[in-house]
Amino acid sequence: MTFILFLAAVTGLLVVMRKESGAKPAIGVMVVTGLLSLFLASGLLALILFIGAAVTAAAGLPGFRRSWLTPRVFAMFKKVAPKVSDTEKVALEAGTVSWDGELFTGRPDWHSLLINRNTGLSEKEQAFVDNQCTQAISMCNAWDLAVERADLPADLWEFLKKEKFFGMIIPEEYGGLHFSAKAQTAVLQKLAANEMLMVTVGVPNSLGPGELLVKYGTDEQKNHYLPRLADGREIPCFGLTGPRAGSDATSLPDTGVVCKGEFEGKEVLGLRLNFEKRWITLAPVATVVGLAFRMFDPDGLLGDTKDYGITCALIPRNTKGMEIGRRHCPIGTPFMNGPIKGTDVFIPLDYIIGGQEMAGQGWRMLVECLSVGRCITLPSGAAGAAAYSVGTAGGFTRVRRQFNTPVADMEGVQEPLARIAAQTYIAQSAVNQTANLIDKGEKPAVPSAILKYHLTEMQRAVLTDAMDVHGGKTVTLGPRNYLGIGFSGAAVSITVEGANIMTRSLMIFGQGAIRCHPYVLKELAAKDNDDIDAFDDAFFGHAGLIFGNAARAFTQALGIGKPDVPFDHDSRKYAQGVARFSAAFGLCADAA
């Protein structure tokens, strides 16, 4: 009887923990089983259960814990919790949390994922992918572009401008295409058959002057620049990274000091810029430069603020003091990329994106835009390169024969072919689903980092497998080698927009564990606001989540209590597996 009551107590507590029902049901389970044990079985078991009920009541019931436990925990938390700077707070609060937050709960809501079905492209968007994109690709040869020219041919540049490839994110009222995020990914996946072409089109439609102007520009700035960006009269670039500020973009050494200077024959209030940027895509051909710098007002010409922080401005190419036009040579695919340097460059305050009132808001602008842009350009390019590898590797291994057999029929070759197909399917599904979330209004900050890291790593792995199954066909560069140049250029995707090592360690888990967690951000906010009641709710909600995930991970690992999921028989077990590992992940993340 003692063992039966013990099992009943454990089962009841596991049910309560799985449902995160709180302290009262747990106390009820222990009191009832304790009384039964006292009268029917072991007094020792009853004593243990009564002690457990008392401890749970003292630590779990709000009326008790807030009088003695919460103040002590709060005081300790304030000592050990890191101070979140304003810069870090902006980054943590950027974007939105959608289904990625469900993975921390241990019981993901599948209905919230399935309700936002991908409805596909509009007729206009699909026609653009089928026609203009196909024609653009037909004008490319990887060897010619990368080796003979180190540039796109002039007729292709003109075609891209004429068909408004550079205006996919610009509203139609300004002459742009205003494509959905799904359409942008489809275009870039199609163009990824040639990486130089994909990068040239992708960058102006990602984080840069166009997107910043659409979201933050003044009406005057929008009316002047957006039509010119849409039809290619202006080619943009954005200067953020430099010799001393790469992945840590907040450590910008570039400065803009408020002063008076001459502009168009008049003395005006403006900024004296000194900067050195490096690895800036499209810089050699750009006609307008978006620039990030730290803004200072040491003489108080604008007010009491001395250090405004990161600010973004638009600078025409011919501005006096700016050196631009030199090129870097990116490995594998020498797309337009180069340094920009400025010495005592004077610009009026009107050049600040959004005008003077947006001074110091550059970091917020950048992280808010990056949460979307990082989801699209590089992940789409990676998915497109993988799809290209499926076609080339699959086709080649069918026509290539060795030992009087198509090499595609050899099991040793089928293994990498299977990996290529599987990873391509994952990449395309991930980028299309996330683009669909963007079109539904989400700004997926953490998923963007997940996509950037995993899809570019998949791209590298897929290209390696594709090279392997081609054997000697692709180890010698030349006009007929359709893989070699893209393979050697894969390192670029790994590095840009946050090196993958940093993205994995800092962005995916570091930011994700705080941003996507149901309670951590609330706990930090309560600490900063010295709000003990808010901390009590968040901390003990967090504790309940830990117990809940422990119970769910344990029981589901034993095959007990599998969640009901809205999928058919074939898919059900995979969704239930995700739910199980969601609980285990949430538990491990809290332990870490």
Image (tube, grey):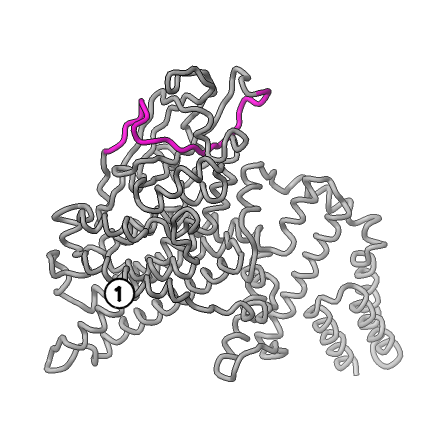
Residue linked to disc 1 = 388
Q: Is residue 138 above or below residue 324?
A: below
Q: Which quadrant holds the N terminus? A: bottom right
Left or right for 98, reference 395: right
Q: Position of residue 147 (x, y in %)?
A: 14, 49
Residue 182, x across and y down, in percent: 42, 61
Residue drawn at 71 percent across, 40 percent down: 529
Q: Position of residue 484 (x, y in %)?
A: 18, 58
Q: How many marks?
A: 1
Q: Can you say which quadrant of the picture contains the C terminus?
A: bottom right
Q: Is residue 372 left or right of residue 37?
A: left
Find the residue positioned furthest to the right: 39
Mark 1 residue type: Tyr
Q: Is residue 289 above or below residue 229?
A: above
Label 1: how many residues lie within 10 Å, few (<14), some (14-19) or many (20+)?
many
Residue 315 painted magenta: yes
Q: Where does the image place residue 478, in percent across and percent down from the top left?
A: 11, 56
Magenta stretch: includes residue 152: no
Give 323 or 403, whichever is nearer the viewer: 323
Is 218 situated left or right of 533 in this image?
left
Q: Nearer the viewer, residue 251 or 164?
A: 164
Residue 433 visible, this orientation:
yes
Height in image: 320 above or below 126? above
Q: Which residues are magenta?
A: 303-325
Q: Does any portion of residue 592 appear in the rendered image?
A: no
Lateral position of residue 485 relative to residue 266, left or right? left
- Disc 1, SS: helix
| Residue beneath the point at 45% across and 60% down | 435
Report the residue at 34% width, 33% height from top. 277
In the image, 150 versus 224, the foreground residue is: 224
